[in-house]
DNA sequence: TTGACTTAGTTAGTTAGCTAACTATAATGA
DNA sequence: TCATTATAGTTAGCTAACTAACTAAGTCAA
């Protein structure tokens, strides 16, 4: 997401602000800091998942299926919830099916539709990954108390509300 | 980064916490919220840059060059600062050179080395993109006052310190 | 009822990132 | 000195995302 490692120093930002007076230095700092930490968290998550032979895309599919009462859904619904295109979901499901973590079954009513079911092996994989993920995440966030978590939540909501201004 | 659109509700998290007692619900919420907002910011940044025919990777290269006193650097140094591999940097520079935004010149001392220089067209491109980027970012962060920005900075530092615990 | 549209899923081809391996050059130490 | 090792840059091939286009099936209205 944010590859950049060499974040601008205050001096650099001031130099740029001289040429570009639109610059709001503390806004830029906050923005880059947020992207930097989020990217590092995402990389850490990837590292955790890869120990179990998973990547984020495929892992989220398993979780979405586990959330379902019948442990099953359709590629379209999964794509929507996972935030990827249906074409991408086809590829994710191909991989999961190959590894036996989900099964494709013909939908009974709509013959265009396919039912995707979490297999026992898929559930077992989650039972292996989730405790590891949750333990690590707990440790990672241990330094931030409840008050800090609430503050973060409020700040993120404020920034989120501003994103439409970014897009205009 | 975080594709997932359908973030878990409190009920879902509680259901998962029953099966996986390691779960720290407010930690998970904070983590996902942070990744979600950061991803949306990154997407908004991409949209802004694409109006000017740029993507993040190539844009950061231009900025890194503009930071240099002589407006020039080497592929290796740029790769390190941009946080990508040298192979990736080769590809980014190919594209930028094709568009005339940077120039490859032979380094005088070390004959293995190549000097990359920001061209006048490259500087002009930045002079077009940066005011737009800075204006949008200012508007996006307008809802967060200085106190909030300081709080965010502290919170991010706390979380950042915890990332090593995620990796163990 | 049939022609136009919509929806579900897949396939094909593109992209930007990656790793691994390569060439050329430089640096180092027995 | 010269054999080894390290560094700079590139190339080739992989991956997971994307868009666009396709087939098949369902829906709807004139």
Image (cartoon, coloured by chain):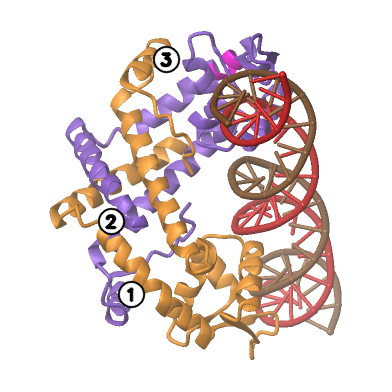
Chain colours: A orange, B purple, C brown, D red
Residue B159, magenta (yes or no): no
- For the question of whether residue B163 can be seen, the reply is yes
Asked whether the residues under the numbered discs 2 and 1 touch, taking CB atoms below 8 Å apart as contact, a structural biologist would say no
On screen, residue B71 above or below A74: above
Q: CA distance from mark 3 to mark 1?
A: 47 Å
Residue at x-position 36% and y-position 19%: A13
Q: Which residue is mark 2?
A: A140
- Specify start and end residues of the magenta stretch as a single range: B122-126
Q: Which residue is mark 3?
A: A20
Protein chain holding label 1: B
On screen, residue A55 above or below D26: above
Image-based side of B104 in relation to A72, left or right: right
Protein chain holding label 2: A
Which SS class for mark 2? helix
Which of the image's four quarters has the C terminus of chain A?
Answer: top left
Label 2 crowd (10 A; few <14 / some 14-19 / many >=20): many
Asked whether the residues under the numbered discs 2 and 3 touch, taking CB atoms below 8 Å apart as contact, a structural biologist would say no
Query: Residue B53, how many percent across, how many down?
Result: 63, 30
- For the question of whether residue A67 can be seen, the reply is no
Query: Residue B139, how many percent across, how many down?
Result: 36, 31
Query: Residue A50, how many percent across, how many down?
Result: 50, 63
Numbered badge on residue B12: 1
Image-based side of B7 in relation to B25, left or right: right
State which mark lies toward you, 2 or 3: 2
């Amino acid at each position: 997401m944010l590859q950049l490692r060499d974040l601008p120093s205050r001096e650099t930002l001031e130099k740029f602000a001289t040429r570009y007076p639109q610059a709001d230095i503390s806004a830029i700092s906050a923005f880059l800091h947020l992207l930097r930490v989020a990217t590092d968290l995402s990389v850490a998550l990837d590292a955790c998942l890869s120990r179990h032979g998973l990547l984020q895309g495929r892992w989220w599919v398993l979780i979405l299926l586990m959330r379902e009462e019948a442990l099953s859904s359709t590629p379209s619904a999964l794509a929507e919830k996972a935030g990827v295109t249906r074409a991408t979901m086809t590829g994710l499901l191909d991989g999961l099916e190959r590894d036996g973590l989900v099964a494709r079954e013909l939908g009974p009513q709509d013959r265009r539709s396919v039912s995707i079911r979490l297999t026992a092996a898929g559930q077992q994989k989650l039972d292996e990954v989730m405790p590891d993920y949750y333990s690590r995440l707990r440790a990672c966030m241990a330094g931030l108390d409840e008050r800090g978590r609430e503050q973060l939540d409020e700040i993120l909501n404020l920034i989120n509300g501003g994103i439409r201004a970014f897009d205009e």
